[in-house]
Amino acid sequence: MRFLFHAMLGFSIGVVGTGLVYGTIVRDRVVHDGARGHRVHARDVVPRVPLEMTVVPPLPMFPRYGEPVVPGATLAWHLPDGTDGAELELSSTPTFEPGATRQIDVDGETFKLPQGLPVGILYWRLRGRQGDVTGEQTTPTWMVDVVAPAGEPAWG
């Protein structure tokens, strides 16, 4: 029994020691920045932005999720303090695929949908904007059902 205890203790010390050594090696690792051809520390490869400098996304207000709307309806949101606009993404797909997504810079808290909008499901989300800086974080995806105005056929 005594041998088993000492074997397990030795194994545990070995694992901890290996982790400490490996962590030190990785922390001080130098990577090559091929674009500029000089050496850069691994910790400097990913730029860090202080939390205070991030741009918070707006809070979508209406229309409610899944609500039927006609072309020309208004999307509205609330801008957090310190932001002056938003980047609105409109898409026919919930994954916002590049070919099916339109990005629109909007000043203020509303956007009027275009009149020629096709009938069907439309997904939208927002990114906050502060001056020339657009945030990385988006709101959750919202969806509206674009329907034909009363008296007009849906196909047309």
Image (cartoon, rainbow, N blue to C red):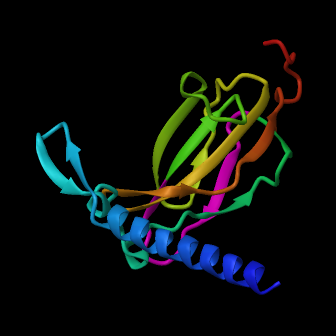
| In front of the other: 56 or 151 | 56
Place of residue 74 in the rendered image (x, y in percent of width and height, measured from the top left):
67, 48
Total marks in image: 0
Quadrant in the picture for residue 1:
bottom right
Place of residue 46 in the rendered image (x, y in percent of width and height, measured from the top left):
34, 57
At 88% from the left and 23% from the top, the residue drawn is 151
Direction from residue 93 to residue 34 in the image, left or right? left
| In front of the other: 1 or 55 | 1
At 37% from the left and 75% from the top, the residue drawn is 50
Place of residue 41 in the rendered image (x, y in percent of width and height, measured from the top left):
23, 59
Which quadrant, please, contains the C terminus?
A: top right
Membership of 72 in magenta stretch = yes
Quadrant in the picture for residue 49:
bottom left
Place of residue 67 in the rendered image (x, y in percent of width and height, measured from the top left):
86, 46
Task: Identify the residue at the far bottom of this view.
Answer: 2
| In front of the other: 75 or 137 | 137
Quadrant in the picture for residue 145:
top right
Q: Which residues are magenta?
A: 71-86
Direction from residue 48 to residue 92 in the image, left or right? right
Residue 46 vs 124, above or below: the answer is below
Direction from residue 72 to residue 155 in the image, left or right? right
| In front of the other: 32 or 65 | 32
Residue 99 vs 12, above or below: the answer is above
At 87% from the left and 16% from the top, the residue drawn is 153
Residue 97 vs 57, above or below: the answer is above
Task: Identify the residue at the far top of this view.
Answer: 155
At 58% from the left and 64% from the top, the residue drawn is 58
Residue 3 vs 121, above or below: the answer is below
